[in-house]
Amino acid sequence: MAVTIKELSYQYPDGTTGLHSISVKMARGKRTAILGINGSGKSTLLYHLNGTFLPQKGEIIVLDEPVTKNNLENVRKKVGFLFDYPDHQLFATTVARDVAFGPRNYRFSEEEATKAAETAMTKVGIMELKEKPPYQLSLGQKKRTAIAGVLAMNPDLIVCDEPFSGLDTYAEEQFKSVLDEWINEGKSLIFSTHDIDMVYGWADEVVIMAEGKILEIGCAEHILNNKELMQRAKLRRPILAEIFEDRTEKPRTTFEALKYIKSGTFDSLKKINSKEEKK
Ligand SMILES: Nc1ncnc2c1ncn2[C@@H]1O[C@H](COP(=O)(O)OP(=O)(O)O)[C@@H](O)[C@H]1O
Ligand SMILES: [Mg+2]
């Protein structure tokens, strides 16, 4: 398992409940989406996965490492964390120094750290920005710099809080393909989002959260088509699931849907429409 959580609760200092006795297991090697409306507890859960928050009650094991105060170094070697606002984790004077910061800090030699940083910067396409100060970058470039810093550490699990929010379509696609490549190496990804349509087309596994609780976990297609469950979480179903509800084809991305519409399926849709017009 990538993550095993048993009866984890968390209360903020002002008394607000962040998590309410949640238990869940998340598999390795998958794109796991944590889906829920604002305030449902997604960030609070993610902060526990690398020990930013320690369990007040209950237990967490991430990649065989218990998340406890004394074991944080081992946890953070295996778990890379990407905050929702990249400004929270970029602070060096240049992009290259920022990306090399993690490896340098974790006792890589100077040479190894530079090499790890260059490989990661090449992977995410920011080599031409390497001498720039991070604060001068666009949001997409900042996010790519932050992910390069995470990749340079070569973790087994990447945890991302709302990784695609604020990105344009092109930057989102680029970011996804970096993560896809990484998943194809057998690593794991857990990310939070409220973008249902993106989850339908991209995630393998989905965890539905509401009011600090986990309502359900399962494969994306199955979970997102469960009307009653989605209603309970105050979420709508994916638009493509609605459009193709009565059809045998079940495209999960607009690209797939376009293929069906351009093929024979489109003719049968036209027939249905013209019949209805005659009525
Ligand atoms: N620093 C904080 N102090 C008090 N309450 C907080 C704090 N951060 C979050 N909360 C509350 O905890 C609950 C869960 O929040 P959060 O995990 O941020 O949700 P999400 O990421 O799904 O939007 C919400 O009710 C939120 O208002
Ligand atoms: Mg959040």
Image (cartoon, grey):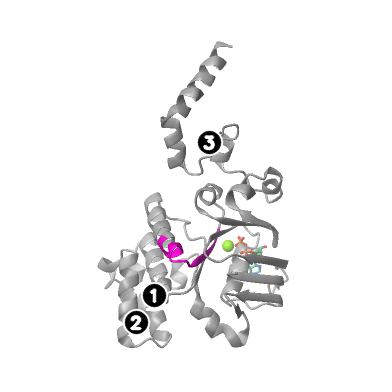
Disc 3 packing (10 Å; few <14; some 14–19; many ≥20): few
Q: Magenta stretch?
A: 181-192
The residue at which mark 3 appears reads as: 249
Magenta span contains residue 190: yes
Q: Position of residue 30 (x, y in %)?
A: 53, 61
| Residue 152: assigned label | 1
- Mark 3 Cβ inside 8 Å of ligand 1: no
Q: Earlier in the sequence, mark 2 or mark 3?
A: 2
Disc 1 packing (10 Å; few <14; some 14–19; many ≥20): many
Residue at image coords 50%, 52%: 202
* Apparent side of residue 214 relative to residue 140 in the rendered image (left or right): right
Residues at marks 2 and 1 touching, judged by CB atoms closer than 8 Å: yes
* Apparent side of residue 140 relative to residue 40 in the rendered image (left or right): left
Residue at image coords 53%, 46%: 197
Magenta span contains residue 195: no
Q: Earlier in the sequence, mark 3 or mark 1?
A: 1
Q: Amino acid at mark 1?
A: Ala
Q: Position of residue 90 (x, y in %)?
A: 41, 73
- Between circles 3 and 1, the one closer to the viewer is 3
Frontmost residue, 33 versus 37: 33
